[in-house]
Image (cartoon, grey):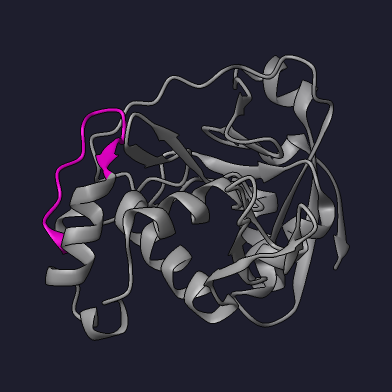
């Protein structure tokens, strides 16, 4: 991840040292950005109770409560004493995957929620996309080709419009990784709607094995 800066002229959060012809102020270096991104994802997708914050049934959490919770209740809080509301907002605005969303000093994860959370988000349906991708390990491939892709501990299976991103996500789990080409029309004909999680993430309850068109190594 890149550093995050704040423009001294227009006030925008940017990833460039210079903006509007002026040297921008460093708000968060790449290391802090990565750590905060991972922590925010964990809190909003899996465990708001870990920092003693309340989440509504659409996944929204007050930003001030998150900042207070991180600085006071997170186990490694000595590493996050610097976190402010501005850091959360800048992280969300510049998130490259569009994983988060802001509204009225509230923040939520757009997708990826643990099945244990009682979250109900209304997603827009994608009725047009034709091809989607899913990265996985070669070890899991034989099970997928037999049983399909299941959401396991999450509410949805995550698919992407970008095959490179599918490979990148799969590599986080180590080992040999493969990319599955998924036929979106097959999903719809099988009764599974395709929902828009972000600008390039699509969500579906299940991918039947017959909807996997092709498998290749990343």
Could you say which is closer to the camera, residue 192 or residue 69?
69
Between 10 and 144, the one lying in front of the other is 10
Q: Please tell me whether the stretch drawn in magenta is mainly helix, strand or loop.
A: loop
Q: Residue at x 15, y 56 (%)?
A: 49
| Quarter-of-image position of residue 73 | bottom left
Name the residue located 57 percent from the left edge and 34 percent from the top edge: 197
Residue that appears at 74% across and 71% down: 177
Q: Position of residue 108 (x, y in %)?
A: 38, 40
Quadrant assignment, res 148: top right
Q: Quadrant where the N terminus lies? A: bottom right
Number of dots carrying numbers: 0
Please check the rendered image and state whether residue 60 is part of the magenta-colored stretch, yes or no: yes
Residue 90 pos. (x, y %): 51, 53
What is the span of residues highlighted in magenta in the rendered image?
50-62
On whether residue 128 falls in the magenta region, the answer is: no
Position of residue 122 measured from the top left corner of the image (x, y, whole percent): 43, 19
């Amino acid at each position: 991840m890149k550093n995050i800066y704040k423009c001294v002229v227009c006030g925008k959060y940017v990833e460039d040292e210079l903006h509007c012809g002026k040297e921008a102020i460093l708000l968060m270096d790449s290391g802090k950005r990565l750590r905060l991104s991972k922590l925010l994802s964990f809190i909003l997708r899996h465990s708001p109770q870990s920092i003693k914050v309340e989440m509504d049934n659409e996944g929204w959490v007050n930003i001030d409560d998150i900042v207070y919770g991180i600085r006071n209740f997170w186990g490694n809080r000595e590493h996050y004493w610097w976190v402010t509301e501005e850091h959360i907002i800048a992280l969300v605005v510049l998130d490259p995957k569009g994983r988060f969303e802001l509204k009225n000093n509230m923040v939520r994860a757009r997708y990826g929620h643990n099945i244990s959370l009682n979250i109900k988000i209304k997603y827009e349906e994608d009725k047009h996309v034709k091809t989607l991708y899913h990265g996985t390990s070669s070890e899991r491939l034989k099970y997928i080709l037999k049983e399909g892709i299941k959401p396991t501990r999450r509410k949805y299976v995550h698919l992407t419009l970008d095959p490179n991103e599918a490979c990148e996500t799969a590599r986080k789990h180590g080992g040999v990784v493969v990319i599955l080409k998924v036929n979106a029309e097959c999903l719809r004909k099988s009764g599974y709607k395709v929902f828009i999680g972000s600008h390039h993430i699509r969500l579906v309850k299940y991918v039947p094995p017959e909807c996997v068109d092709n498998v290749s190594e990343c």
